[in-house]
Image: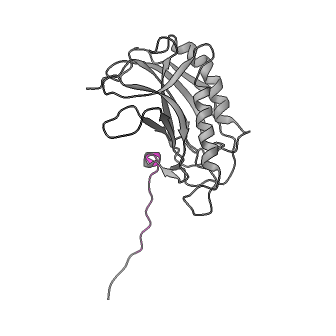
Amino acid sequence: MPNYSPHSLVTFGGVLNLNATETEIWQCGVRVRAVGTGGPLADHDAYLASASTALSAWFSDASTAAKFPASATLNWMKANPIQQDGKYSDPNTHLHDFTTPVPGASTSTTVPDILCICLSWQTGKAIRKGSYATHGRIYPPNYLAAAASGDMRLSAGVAGFWAARGHALLAALNGTGHPCVPIIASPHSHEQEPITGCRVGDVYDSQRRRKSALKEVYTAVAYASG
């Protein structure tokens, strides 16, 4: 049975690629604990009112070399308290819907939108067998990152740009007036570790779940031997 120490789970997501005939969705989540108390946020609705503005600015940021595609949108954000069994401890879901979905800032040519660059969270705890709450990851809709044509390896410097974007996300989630610490929370014996950094590899990753809405159409060619 899960054995979490109480905290809050912040999730956010939207539409993956508006240009697709059958649109898919994306979602990411980061666990946090309140500064001072070390438990769930005191007021999840007030936190959302604050942090949603920063998250919108982060997603639509056009000043960075690591932009999200304009065909992907940020549609919603949630923040909810998590109890020991890993479920919400509040029967009311705390949700912020963006009145107008927030698009990314890049109009570059896309690669298939099941590709993405993983943002990996680091902690001060060494990764070794039997250790818990050592690291985590999210898969945002960043499928426009530069790579050589047909190559799975990112162009020079791109991984660094996205590592900085991961750092900026953690800052955006620290709501004004409702400060929190991003954490990796393990369901093993209440273990939690603060996130201390973001690292990004230079090879594209993939998320097969992001083609669940796509219905394959087959074309057949008959063959008769002899």
Q: At 43% across and 49% down in the image, what residue appears?
A: 208
Residue 124 shown left or right of residue 104 in the figure: left
Prevalent SS, magenta region: loop
Q: At 71% across and 41% down in the image, what residue appears?
A: 64
Front in this rendered view, residue 148 or 219: 148
Front in this rendered view, residue 114 or 171: 171
**Where is residue 169 drawn, in percent x and y?**
59, 32
Does the magenta run of residues contain 214?
Answer: yes
Q: What are the residue bounds of the magenta stretch? A: 210-221
Q: Is residue 100 visible?
A: no
**Where is residue 116 drawn, in percent x and y?**
53, 48
Q: Is residue 95 above or below residue 121?
A: above
What quarter of the picture does the N terminus occupy?
A: top left
What quarter of the picture does the C terminus occupy?
A: bottom left
Q: At 52% across and 11% down in the image, what residue appears?
A: 43
Residue 65: image quadrant is: top right
Q: Is residue 81 visible?
A: yes
- Which residue is most to the right? 63
Front in this rendered view, residue 90 or 25: 90
Q: At 44% across and 66% down in the image, what residue appears?
A: 219
